[in-house]
Image (cartoon, rainbow, N blue to C red):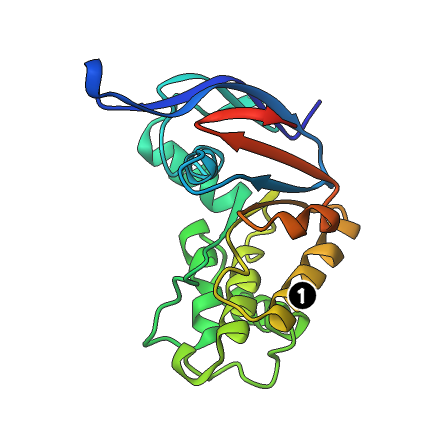
Amino acid sequence: MSLIELQGISRVYGSGPSAVHALRPSTLSVEEGTFVAVYGPSGSGKSTMLNMLGLLDEPTAGSYLLEGQNVARLSDAERSTIRCRKIGIIFQSFNLFPHFSILENVCMPMRFAGIPRHEMKPRAAELLERVGLGSRLYHSPSQLSGGQCQRVAIARSLANNPAVLLGDEPTGNLDVKTGAEILGIFHELVAEGRTVIMVTHNADYEKEVQRVIELQDGRVVRQ
């Protein structure tokens, strides 16, 4: 059984002649432990697909099986619960809480998942140590570089031991050297059996991943 299966999934915004077909009916599967790039130009449907995979938006039609469970038609509350427990999302703009320490930022998903308080900080500290920030636990995001903030975002995405990590242009705001370091972390995670799906417009990343899903005008043209 695949970790992810999309069966005829689509997303249409609006209706009638003005309807926007952001993602046309798409069928694909992703195996556990795979490093995948979702590639295409601006407006191709990459972000829409990421929103579907991350349960941030509901598809217009089709089914989405995550670990065998159809999550496409769940309520908002049910989707939030599954997203918290099974999906880690890494945003291009980091989306860190500016007034919290990075340790507290990494604890946030665990709070939502109901992890006991005495377990949260040791787990967060362990994850930050892993991404090279173990000496900066009580720094705020404003005291870190962009690359360090992205490392915090990766640590946060791992907080609840999710089945899949989704990256929305996770290296888009970083210089080449720092972007390569972030890709190195992703390779380590995949080597451990994690599934990483990264949205990108950078064709050079094709050689970094095991599989490319290419979109054009809302259609999957390669997978």
Q: Position of residue 202 (x, y in %)?
A: 58, 51
What is the quadrant of residue 19 in the picture? top left
Q: Position of residue 3 (x, y in %)?
A: 65, 30
Q: How many marks?
A: 1
Residue 13 is left or right of residue 171, and the answer is: left
State the quadrant of the N terminus.
top right
Camera-nearest residue between 216 and 45: 216
Camera-nearest residue between 152 and 175: 175
What residue do we see at 59% from left, 73% from top? 125
Residue 16 is left or right of residue 188, and the answer is: left
Residue 76 is left or right of residue 41, and the answer is: left
Camera-nearest residue between 18 and 161: 18
State the quadrant of the C terminus.
top right
Say if 103 sits above or below 53 in the image.
below
Q: Position of residue 57 (x, y in %)?
A: 36, 34
Element marked by disc 1: helix
Q: Which residue is mark 1?
A: 180
What is the quadrant of residue 12 in the picture? top left
What amino acid is labelled 1 in the image? Answer: Ala
Say if 27 sits above or below 33 in the image.
above
What residue do we see at 52% from left, 20% from top? 26
Q: Position of residue 48 (x, y in %)?
A: 41, 35
